């Protein structure tokens, strides 16, 4: 008698995790692809991370996403790290091949894919201002550099952190660090301005990561935040006639790349987007 097919086990590890939209997004993708599987929220405390990773092998999960606060600490617990994730210094996706765990970072490529699909297909030769120099900024800057922009300017509250990143990646692109005092002028001259900080996220929806004094027509303003869908930062840019790009697309595409790594199937992006939108409204 043939064995019944075991459902594909997937999940997301973090602390906290109850608020994560990943389970409903991935379950909608599994359903739309007619794949028998489950994607579950896994509440893992920092002290339990090594045992939780062992559990992935022991319970034969096909893969997991990794979110705050484990994206960096999980790296030494894996068997292999993809080159981009290694340079970024963070993993958000783990693939389990018969007990061998490989870490990837799909945040940056997810962001760039969404930017290209939704607003501007050609990033080559552009000037990009990135606000923030933390983990999220590293992911998107690394992926943006693959698109051959003319330059990426990094503005950060702690200038030193931006300067260190510029030095670290001087071999892969034209990067410049500036203080937040100089960021308004840089924003009025850039082709694309991206907020990678959490400033403006629910519940602090009236806060701005940067006060922009003048807007250049045709510029793109982008935010990694997707709750609210349109931050105050994007709302002001939109009122000034700039094109805007919310963080929802990055969230969807980082998930879509992870889904492809686990299943080999291209998921239904619109179903994933709708599942998240329904949960936000
Ligand atoms: P993430 O993984 O979300 O990027 P992180 O690595 O802690 O989180 O980085 C947060 C980034 O947002 C940093 O660039 C941080 O600036 P500092 O390096 O000066 O800390 C920036 N950030 C966070 N809160 C901020 C605030 N209220 N104003 C300006 N920048 C802020």
Image (spheres, rainbow, N blue to C red):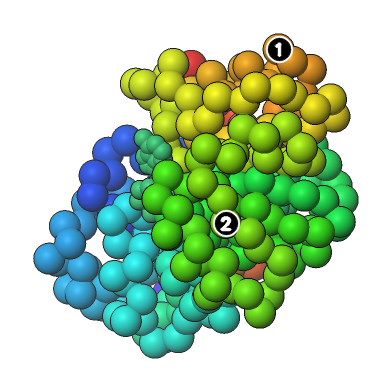
Residue under label 1: 239
Q: Mark 2 or mark 1, which is nearer the start of the sequence?
A: 2
Task: State the quadrant of the N terminus.
Answer: bottom left
- Is 191 placed left or right of 132 in the picture? right
Q: Residues within 10 Å of mark 1 (few under 14, many from 20)?
A: few
Q: Residues within 10 Å of mark 2 (few under 14, many from 20)?
A: many
Residue at position x 48%, y 16% in the image: 281
Q: Secondary structure at mark 2?
A: strand
Res 11 visible = no
Residue under label 2: 177
- Could you say where residue 76 lies in the image, as x and y percent from the top left? 32, 81
Q: Secondary structure at mark 1?
A: helix
Quadrant assignment, res 166 = bottom right
Residue at position x 40%, y 50% in the image: 158
Residue at position x 52%, y 37% in the image: 181
Question: Is 197 or 268 nearer to us in this picture?
Answer: 197
- Is 41 placed left or right of 111 in the picture? left
């Amino acid at each position: 008698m043939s064995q019944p097919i075991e459902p594909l086990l997937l999940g997301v590890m973090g602390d906290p995790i109850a608020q994560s939209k990943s389970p409903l997004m991935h379950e909608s993708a599994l359903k739309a692809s007619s794949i028998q599987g489950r994607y579950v929220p896994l509440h893992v405390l920092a002290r339990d991370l090594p045992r939780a990773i062992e559990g992935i092998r022991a319970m034969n999960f096909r893969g997991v996403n990794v979110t705050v606060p484990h994206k960096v600490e999980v790296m030494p617990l894996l068997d292999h790290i993809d080159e981009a994730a290694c340079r970024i210094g963070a993993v958000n996706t783990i693939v389990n091949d018969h007990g061998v765990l490989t870490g990837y970072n799909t945040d940056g490529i997810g962001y760039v894919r969404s930017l290209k699909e939704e607003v501007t297909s050609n990033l080559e030769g552009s000037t990009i201002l990135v606000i923030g120099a933390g983990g999220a900024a590293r992911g998107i800057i690394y992926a943006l550099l693959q698109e051959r922009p003319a330059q990426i300017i990094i503005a950060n509250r702690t200038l030193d952190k931006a300067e260190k990143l510029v030095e670290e990646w001087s071999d892969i692109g034209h990067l410049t660090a500036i203080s937040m005092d100089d960021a308004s002028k840089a924003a009025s001259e850039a082709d694309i301005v991206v907020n990678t900080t959490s400033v403006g996220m629910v519940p602090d929806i009236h806060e701005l990561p940067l006060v922009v004094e003048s807007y250049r027509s045709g510029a793109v303003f982008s935010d990694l935040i997707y709750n609210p869908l349109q931050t105050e930062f994007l709302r002001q840019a939109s009122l000034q006639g700039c094109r805007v790009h919310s963080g929802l697309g990055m969230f969807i595409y980082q998930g879509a790349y992870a889904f492809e790594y686990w299943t080999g199937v291209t998921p239904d992006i619109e179903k994933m987007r709708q599942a998240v939108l329904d949960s936000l409204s």
